[in-house]
Amino acid sequence: MSTNARRSLRHRLADDLRALVLSGELAPGAQLPSEPELARRMRVSRSSLRSAIALLEEEGLLRPVHGSGTYVNDRPLLRDDLSRNLSGTEMIAATGRTPGARLTEARLEPAPPDVAAAFGLPDGTPLSALRRVRTADDQPVIDTTDWCRPEVLDPVAMADPVDGSVYRALAERGLAIHHGVATMRPAVADARIAERLEVPEGSLLLTLFQTDSTADGVVALVSLEIYRADAFLISVYRRGPGDDASA
């Protein structure tokens, strides 16, 4: 069997298993049937089944328990594909979960040095800042801070963005986001973030500092997003050497 055919079978099996979960036939917390039984039921080899299960474990839909078996996750991980610059609202909604926000606070405040530098402004320049905790099915998953020039979005407009998305509010003002440049760093939860994200102090987090620009290079928004590491699976599309004409 060719490599492409094996990949196709693996993905088809993963789709079939995913459908069993989404239909409720395999409920959250349920244990999958044994590997031999499931392979017989799906009329495939155990090796093909293992490959499909591995895909769903990578997605966070299934979790292996050593010495016990494979289980459906109670709360599947949210998949964030960093090759797509979606708002938090769009990203959460795309997973089939209900997006929301809490602890929303907007005010005019001096720009921190890294934020001011991203806008090309002097340190301390007043900017509109919006802080909120993004939720998925009412579970806190991201602590976000967005900064914008007050002449574009003042704190009142930041506090009540269109459909909950600052991107949409900017687009309505003629500043549609064309691309973002993000820097990722690991972090641990201090007391304030632990309380906001409802995790133990010292929990592993992932931070994303992002500068969003229009097609003509105008910086419209700077954001700091702090992700719960136990709620997300981050994926990145990477071009291989085969795509490089000089390779």
Image (cartoon, rainbow, N blue to C red):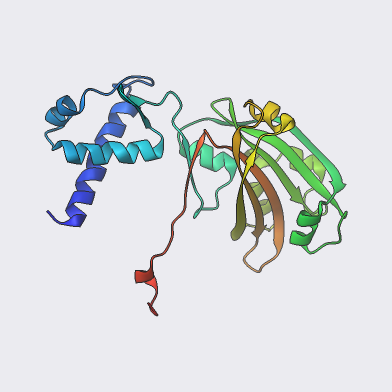
Q: Residue at x 70, y 35 (%)?
A: 132
Q: How many marks?
A: 0
Name the residue at the front extreme: 67
- The answer to whether one can see residue 173 in this image is no
- The answer to whether one can see residue 131 in this image is yes
> Left or right of 2: which side holds 130?
right
> Left or right of 120: which side holds 142?
left
- The C terminus lies in quadrant: bottom left
* Above or below, comparing residue 93 to residue 84 in the picture: above
**Location of residue 21 in the rendering, given as x and y in whole percent from the top left corner:** 32, 27
**Location of residue 126 in the rendering, given as x and y in whole percent from the top left corner:** 87, 51
* Above or below, comparing residue 99 to residue 68 in the picture: below
Q: Residue at x 15, y 56 (%)?
A: 2
Q: Residue at x 81, y 55 (%)?
A: 113
* Above or below, comparing residue 82 to residue 59 in the picture: below
> Left or right of 54: which side holds 161?
right
- Residue closest to the eye, 137 or 140: 140
Q: Splitting the image into 4 quarters, where does residue 183 fall?
A: bottom right
Q: Residue at x 55, y 37 (%)?
A: 229
> Left or right of 165: which side holds 119?
right
